[in-house]
Image (tube, helix red, strand yellow):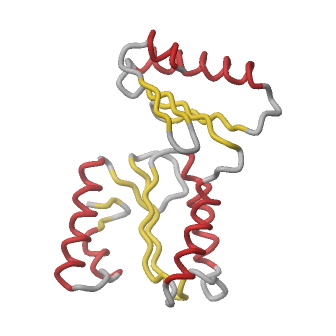
């Protein structure tokens, strides 16, 4: 990845706790995708098909991570820890994803909230808002056009929560949404 970073202007390597990412969001789109495919093939060839890693190519990045590391698995662990610390079930959820790696999370959350009467995490009247950044095919219920609009939405939720010193209700969120497109 470092060789690609050295040879492709605008790209960089991001080392995280459990993954390594070649970020090419600032590279000309066609050139970046071509290099990402080449890097993907090289990693796949060097490591082999039976290695316990997964190579994920997203919008402007190529990520190498352990197979066991899935967003839905991490979310499940987070929900368990949250339910151990909080004595009530979740009644409102806003999850915003940005790429195809969030699709399993959307499925997981839909399954969990459908079974909310049996769920250890969600109340029977839980209002789930699953969003994807950008208008594209997705299992998400809503989309947000631009990251700036998402920032405005989250800021509005935060301001109202501070004003009321309580969680924002689902009815108030509905006022901020129009026809499956968040304001």
Total label count? 0
Residue at x 25%, y 75% (from the top left corner): 175
The image shows residue 180 at horizontal and vertical percentages of: 38, 62
Q: Position of residue 138 (x, y in %)?
A: 52, 52
Residue farthest toward the right in the current orientation of the protein: 50
Viewport quadrant of the N terminus: top right
Asked if residue 70 is positioned above or below residue 59 in the image, the reply reads below
Up the image or down, 43 lies above or below 121; here it is above
Split into 4 quadrants, where in the image is the C terminus?
bottom left
The x, y position of residue 147, in whole percent, is 30, 48
Displayed quadrant of residue 12: top left
Furthest residue to the front?
Answer: 17
Relative to 89, say whether 20 is above or below. above
Image height of 4 relative to 122, above or below: above
Q: Quadrant of residue 119?
A: bottom right
Residue at 23% over, 85% down: 165
Image check: 135 left or right of 165? right
What residue occupies the far top of the structure in this picture?
7
The x and y percentages for residue 38 are 60, 16
Which residue is at 32% across, 48% downward?
145
Left or right position of 179 against 88: left
């Amino acid at each position: 990845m470092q060789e690609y970073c050295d040879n492709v202007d605008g790209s960089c390597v991001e080392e995280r706790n459990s993954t390594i990412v070649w970020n090419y969001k600032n590279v000309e789109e066609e050139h970046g995708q071509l290099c990402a495919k080449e890097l993907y093939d090289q990693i796949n060839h060097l490591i082999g098909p039976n290695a316990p890693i997964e190579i994920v190519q997203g919008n402007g990045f190529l990520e190498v991570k352990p197979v066991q590391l899935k967003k839905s698995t991490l979310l499940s662990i987070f929900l368990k820890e949250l339910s151990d610390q909080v004595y009530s079930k979740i009644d409102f959820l806003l999850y915003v994803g940005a790429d195809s790696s969030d699709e399993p999370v959307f499925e997981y959350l839909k399954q969990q909230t459908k079974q909310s009467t049996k769920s250890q995490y969600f109340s029977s009247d839980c209002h789930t808002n699953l969003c994807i950044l950008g208008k594209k095919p997705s299992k998400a219920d809503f989309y947000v056009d631009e990251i700036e609009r998402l920032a405005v939405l989250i800021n509005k939720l935060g301001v109202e929560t501070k004003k009321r010193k309580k969680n924002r209700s689902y009815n108030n969120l509905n006022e901020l949404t129009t026809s499956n497109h968040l304001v």
